[in-house]
Amino acid sequence: MGHRTPDKHLGYYALRRALQADGCAICHIADQAATRYFDTLLYEHVNDPPVREQIRQAGGFCRRHAWQMYQQGGAFEISILWLDVLREQMHALGTHPRRRVRTGFPRCPACRHVAEEEQRMLQALCEYLEADELLEDYAQSAGLCLPHLHECLAAAPRKARAFLLKIETERLATMTMQLDQATQQYDYRNAQRPWGPAYGVWERATIKVAGNAEEASPRRDQPGNGNTLTAEGEIHA
Protein backbone atom coordinates (compact mmCIF):
# COMPACT_ATOMS: atom_id res chain seq x y z
CA MET A 1 0.00 0.00 0.00
CA GLY A 2 1.42 3.40 -1.00
CA HIS A 3 1.94 6.30 1.34
CA ARG A 4 -1.19 8.41 1.66
CA THR A 5 -0.89 11.81 -0.01
CA PRO A 6 -1.26 14.44 2.72
CA ASP A 7 -3.85 17.17 2.33
CA LYS A 8 -2.48 20.30 0.69
CA HIS A 9 -3.10 22.72 3.54
CA LEU A 10 -1.49 26.15 3.87
CA GLY A 11 1.81 24.53 4.89
CA TYR A 12 2.15 22.96 1.44
CA TYR A 13 1.98 26.32 -0.31
CA ALA A 14 4.23 27.93 2.31
CA LEU A 15 6.83 25.23 1.61
CA ARG A 16 6.55 25.72 -2.15
CA ARG A 17 7.16 29.47 -1.77
CA ALA A 18 10.05 28.88 0.63
CA LEU A 19 11.68 26.42 -1.76
CA GLN A 20 11.65 29.12 -4.43
CA ALA A 21 13.52 31.57 -2.17
CA ASP A 22 17.29 31.80 -1.82
CA GLY A 23 18.99 29.70 0.81
CA CYS A 24 17.49 27.20 3.25
CA ALA A 25 13.71 26.88 2.92
CA ILE A 26 13.12 26.15 6.61
CA CYS A 27 15.32 29.09 7.69
CA HIS A 28 13.16 31.26 5.43
CA ILE A 29 9.98 29.94 7.06
CA ALA A 30 11.47 30.43 10.55
CA ASP A 31 12.31 34.07 9.76
CA GLN A 32 8.77 34.64 8.53
CA ALA A 33 7.38 33.01 11.67
CA ALA A 34 9.40 35.38 13.87
CA THR A 35 8.22 38.39 11.86
CA ARG A 36 4.58 37.32 12.16
CA TYR A 37 5.04 36.64 15.88
CA PHE A 38 6.19 40.19 16.57
CA ASP A 39 3.60 41.75 14.26
CA THR A 40 0.87 39.92 16.18
CA LEU A 41 2.40 40.65 19.58
CA LEU A 42 3.03 44.34 19.00
CA TYR A 43 -0.16 45.27 17.19
CA GLU A 44 -2.73 42.85 18.62
CA HIS A 45 -1.56 41.44 21.98
CA VAL A 46 0.58 44.15 23.55
CA ASN A 47 -2.19 44.72 26.13
CA ASP A 48 -3.05 41.04 26.62
CA PRO A 49 -2.28 40.22 30.31
CA PRO A 50 -1.40 36.50 29.84
CA VAL A 51 0.95 37.33 26.96
CA ARG A 52 2.68 40.05 28.93
CA GLU A 53 2.99 37.75 31.95
CA GLN A 54 4.71 35.14 29.79
CA ILE A 55 7.22 37.74 28.59
CA ARG A 56 7.80 39.02 32.14
CA GLN A 57 8.47 35.52 33.46
CA ALA A 58 10.89 34.85 30.59
CA GLY A 59 12.82 38.03 31.39
CA GLY A 60 12.05 39.37 27.92
CA PHE A 61 13.56 37.95 24.74
CA CYS A 62 16.92 36.59 23.65
CA ARG A 63 19.32 39.08 22.11
CA ARG A 64 18.39 38.23 18.52
CA HIS A 65 14.65 38.55 19.06
CA ALA A 66 14.89 41.60 21.34
CA TRP A 67 16.57 43.49 18.52
CA GLN A 68 14.13 42.11 15.97
CA MET A 69 11.30 43.50 18.10
CA TYR A 70 13.14 46.82 18.20
CA GLN A 71 13.33 46.83 14.41
CA GLN A 72 9.68 45.89 13.87
CA GLY A 73 7.95 47.70 16.70
CA GLY A 74 7.04 51.23 17.62
CA ALA A 75 8.43 53.14 20.59
CA PHE A 76 5.09 52.94 22.43
CA GLU A 77 4.64 49.16 22.18
CA ILE A 78 8.27 48.40 22.99
CA SER A 79 8.18 50.71 26.01
CA ILE A 80 5.10 48.92 27.39
CA LEU A 81 6.76 45.51 27.20
CA TRP A 82 10.16 46.56 28.59
CA LEU A 83 8.45 48.50 31.39
CA ASP A 84 6.82 45.21 32.47
CA VAL A 85 10.09 43.30 32.32
CA LEU A 86 12.15 45.90 34.18
CA ARG A 87 9.57 46.38 36.90
CA GLU A 88 9.56 42.62 37.43
CA GLN A 89 13.34 42.52 37.61
CA MET A 90 13.51 45.53 39.92
CA HIS A 91 11.01 43.84 42.25
CA ALA A 92 12.99 40.57 42.20
CA LEU A 93 16.25 42.34 43.03
CA GLY A 94 14.69 44.44 45.76
CA THR A 95 12.81 41.58 47.40
CA HIS A 96 15.73 39.18 47.62
CA PRO A 97 18.87 41.31 48.01
CA ARG A 98 20.80 38.61 49.91
CA ARG A 99 19.77 35.62 47.89
CA ARG A 100 21.53 34.49 44.77
CA VAL A 101 20.47 36.59 41.80
CA ARG A 102 18.37 34.66 39.32
CA THR A 103 20.34 33.86 36.17
CA GLY A 104 18.08 31.32 34.44
CA PHE A 105 14.80 32.18 32.75
CA PRO A 106 12.27 30.22 30.71
CA ARG A 107 13.08 30.02 27.02
CA CYS A 108 12.62 33.18 24.93
CA PRO A 109 8.93 33.20 23.88
CA ALA A 110 9.82 34.09 20.30
CA CYS A 111 12.41 31.28 20.11
CA ARG A 112 9.82 28.82 21.38
CA HIS A 113 7.26 29.98 18.79
CA VAL A 114 9.77 29.77 15.94
CA ALA A 115 10.99 26.31 17.03
CA GLU A 116 7.41 25.00 17.05
CA GLU A 117 6.85 26.35 13.52
CA GLU A 118 10.15 24.85 12.32
CA GLN A 119 9.19 21.42 13.64
CA ARG A 120 5.72 21.62 12.11
CA MET A 121 7.07 22.54 8.69
CA LEU A 122 9.90 20.00 8.80
CA GLN A 123 7.32 17.30 9.52
CA ALA A 124 5.15 18.56 6.66
CA LEU A 125 8.13 18.56 4.27
CA CYS A 126 8.92 14.94 5.19
CA GLU A 127 5.31 13.90 4.59
CA TYR A 128 5.09 15.60 1.19
CA LEU A 129 8.43 14.18 0.01
CA GLU A 130 7.39 10.70 1.14
CA ALA A 131 4.19 11.07 -0.91
CA ASP A 132 6.19 12.18 -4.00
CA GLU A 133 5.01 15.76 -3.58
CA LEU A 134 7.46 18.69 -3.74
CA LEU A 135 10.24 16.49 -5.17
CA GLU A 136 10.75 18.73 -8.19
CA ASP A 137 10.42 21.89 -6.07
CA TYR A 138 13.09 20.61 -3.71
CA ALA A 139 15.39 19.51 -6.54
CA GLN A 140 15.21 23.00 -8.07
CA SER A 141 15.83 24.72 -4.71
CA ALA A 142 18.94 25.33 -2.62
CA GLY A 143 17.65 22.68 -0.23
CA LEU A 144 18.19 22.87 3.51
CA CYS A 145 21.04 24.09 5.68
CA LEU A 146 22.85 21.28 7.48
CA PRO A 147 21.22 21.89 10.90
CA HIS A 148 17.73 21.65 9.38
CA LEU A 149 18.77 18.78 7.11
CA HIS A 150 19.88 16.67 10.09
CA GLU A 151 16.60 17.42 11.87
CA CYS A 152 14.65 16.44 8.78
CA LEU A 153 16.61 13.22 8.27
CA ALA A 154 15.96 12.21 11.88
CA ALA A 155 12.19 12.41 11.29
CA ALA A 156 11.93 11.42 7.62
CA PRO A 157 10.26 8.17 6.50
CA ARG A 158 12.31 5.77 4.37
CA LYS A 159 11.64 7.15 0.88
CA ALA A 160 11.95 10.80 1.85
CA ARG A 161 15.17 10.05 3.74
CA ALA A 162 16.69 8.28 0.74
CA PHE A 163 15.77 11.19 -1.54
CA LEU A 164 17.29 13.77 0.82
CA LEU A 165 20.47 11.79 1.36
CA LYS A 166 21.05 11.34 -2.37
CA ILE A 167 20.41 14.91 -3.46
CA GLU A 168 22.19 16.58 -0.54
CA THR A 169 25.24 14.31 -0.79
CA GLU A 170 25.55 15.30 -4.45
CA ARG A 171 25.20 18.98 -3.57
CA LEU A 172 27.86 18.76 -0.87
CA ALA A 173 30.22 17.06 -3.32
CA THR A 174 29.70 19.87 -5.84
CA MET A 175 30.13 22.54 -3.18
CA THR A 176 33.30 20.91 -1.87
CA MET A 177 34.76 20.85 -5.39
CA GLN A 178 33.87 24.53 -5.90
CA LEU A 179 35.39 25.51 -2.55
CA ASP A 180 38.60 23.73 -3.53
CA GLN A 181 38.61 25.65 -6.82
CA ALA A 182 37.99 28.91 -4.95
CA THR A 183 41.06 28.37 -2.78
CA GLN A 184 43.15 27.65 -5.87
CA GLN A 185 42.02 30.88 -7.52
CA TYR A 186 44.21 32.78 -5.05
CA ASP A 187 47.34 31.09 -6.37
CA TYR A 188 49.04 33.72 -8.56
CA ARG A 189 49.41 31.13 -11.32
CA ASN A 190 45.60 30.98 -11.61
CA ALA A 191 44.99 34.73 -11.46
CA GLN A 192 43.63 34.87 -15.02
CA ARG A 193 41.53 31.72 -14.80
CA PRO A 194 37.75 32.36 -14.90
CA TRP A 195 35.91 31.70 -11.65
CA GLY A 196 32.96 30.00 -13.26
CA PRO A 197 30.37 28.41 -10.89
CA ALA A 198 32.85 28.60 -7.99
CA TYR A 199 32.35 32.34 -7.63
CA GLY A 200 30.43 33.14 -4.44
CA VAL A 201 30.64 29.56 -3.15
CA TRP A 202 31.94 30.85 0.21
CA GLU A 203 28.57 32.52 0.78
CA ARG A 204 26.62 29.44 -0.31
CA ALA A 205 28.80 27.29 1.97
CA THR A 206 28.13 29.58 4.93
CA ILE A 207 24.38 29.24 4.34
CA LYS A 208 24.70 25.47 3.98
CA VAL A 209 26.69 25.07 7.20
CA ALA A 210 24.97 27.65 9.43
CA GLY A 211 21.69 28.67 7.80
CA ASN A 212 20.42 31.84 6.17
CA ALA A 213 21.75 35.23 7.19
CA GLU A 214 19.45 37.34 9.36
CA GLU A 215 17.66 40.13 7.53
CA ALA A 216 17.11 43.41 9.35
CA SER A 217 13.67 44.98 9.06
CA PRO A 218 13.31 48.75 8.66
CA ARG A 219 12.78 50.52 11.99
CA ARG A 220 9.19 51.63 12.64
CA ASP A 221 8.76 54.14 15.46
CA GLN A 222 5.03 54.76 15.42
CA PRO A 223 3.39 52.18 13.13
CA GLY A 224 0.20 53.05 11.40
CA ASN A 225 0.14 56.82 11.90
CA GLY A 226 3.26 58.09 10.18
CA ASN A 227 4.61 59.70 13.38
CA THR A 228 8.28 59.66 14.37
CA LEU A 229 9.87 59.97 17.79
CA THR A 230 12.65 62.55 18.19
CA ALA A 231 15.69 62.13 20.41
CA GLU A 232 14.02 64.48 22.89
CA GLY A 233 10.98 62.23 23.13
CA GLU A 234 8.66 64.47 21.10
CA ILE A 235 6.31 62.88 18.56
CA HIS A 236 6.26 64.62 15.19
CA ALA A 237 3.75 63.94 12.41
Image (cartoon, rainbow, N blue to C red):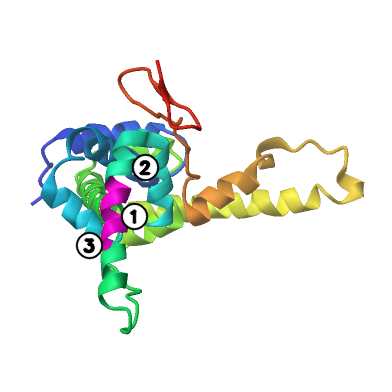
Is residue 68 positioned above or below 123 on the image? above
Decide: marks 1, 2 in contact (CB < 8 A)?
Answer: yes
Mark sitting earlier along the chain (1/2): 1
**Residue at 32% over, 75% down:** 102
* Residue 145 x/y as whole percent: 44, 52
Residue 61 numbered tag: 1
Q: Which SS class for mark 2?
A: helix
Type of the residue with mark 1: Phe
| Boundaries of the magenta span | 81-88
Decide: marks 1, 3 in contact (CB < 8 A)?
Answer: no
Is residue 144 positioned above or below 44 on the image? below
Q: Quadrant of residue 36?
A: top left
* Label 3, residues with CA under 10 Å away: few <14, some 14-19, many ≥20: some
Type of the residue with mark 3: Gln
* Residue 70 x/y as whole percent: 40, 41
68 or 13, nearer to the observer: 68
Q: Main secondary structure of the magenta part?
A: helix
237 or 233, nearer to the observer: 233
> Number of callouts in the render?
3
* Label 2, residues with CA under 10 Å away: few <14, some 14-19, many ≥20: many
Q: Which SS class for mark 1?
A: loop
* CA distance for labels 1 and 3: 10 Å
* Label 1, residues with CA under 10 Å away: few <14, some 14-19, many ≥20: many
191 or 32, nearer to the observer: 32
Residue highlighted by disc 3: 57
* CA distance for labels 3 and 2: 18 Å
